[in-house]
Amino acid sequence: MEKSPNLSQKIYLSILVFLVWFALIFQFSVHINTGVAVKSELVIRFFSYFTIDSNLLVALCSTSILFFRSTSVGRFFAKPQVIAAIAIYIIVVALVYNAVLRFLWAFEGWSMVLNELLHVVVPLMFLGYWIYFVPKQQLQWKHIWFWLIYPLVYTIFVLFRGNYSGFYPYPFLNVTKFGIEKVVVNCAIITLLFAFLSILFVAMARRKTK
């Protein structure tokens, strides 16, 4: 049975829960009022961003552990392999954004604050949570295959929908601009990043366990 969060863990999770939900709700409000498309399309576009989906997973995981630990949902999100998977997803968000996308757009005011929360603050805080509060002895090499399912499903969905709607949430996934061959190469590179981080996480966990 998973242990209940201690006081320091509750304080840490409380800060994380507040920040991630604040960023997601505020960002949704900004996005839905841009007027660049009809509301229904804007909602779909909002949840087409891997950044948003991964931060939402962080929000659901942190909230469930903090407030609903005794429920089936809370027990699921409290599993070390689930937390590790979400940590990998959100770290990929931070790495890809800061290495590839940061200088493509200029943000000001609250947009800049929200951008930093979603791409820097929340990823680092959730990584810190995994490092300091999550038991790691249960992580196994076989978990890596399951961790890669979500990014694969996401990529298939984005490319499939983009083929009909013409909207691609990230430039490196834009088949219309770069062609399918280039996009496949880009996807392969990001898949390798997911795989590398997954291997690193399990290796760190196994070494610490020993």
Image (spheres, rainbow, N blue to C red):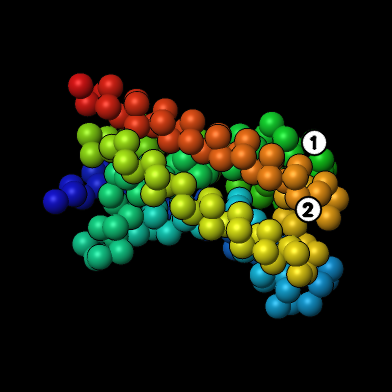
Name the secondary structure under disc 2: helix
Q: How crowded is mark 2: few (under 14 residues within 10 Å), some or many (20 or more)?
A: some
Q: Is residue 73 left or right of residue 54?
A: left
Instruction: Tell me residue 65's x, y (percent).
Output: 31, 54
Disc 1 to disc 2, how far (Cα)?
21 Å
Q: Where, by quadrant of the figure, is residue 132 drawn? A: top left
> At x 24% / y 65%, what residue is drawn?
71
Dot 1: what SS?
Answer: helix
Of labels 1 and 2, the one closer to you: 2
| Residue 87 in the image: above or below residue 72 | above
Residue at which label 2 appears: 175
The disc, 1 or 2, on the residue closer to the chain's N-terminal end is 1
**Circle number at residue 103:** 1
From the image, which quarter does the C terminus lie in?
Answer: top left
Identified by mark 2, the residue type is Val
Q: Which of 167 and 28 is in front in this view?
A: 167
- Is 159 above or below relative to 101? below
Residue at 29% in and 58% down: 76
Count the labels in the image: 2
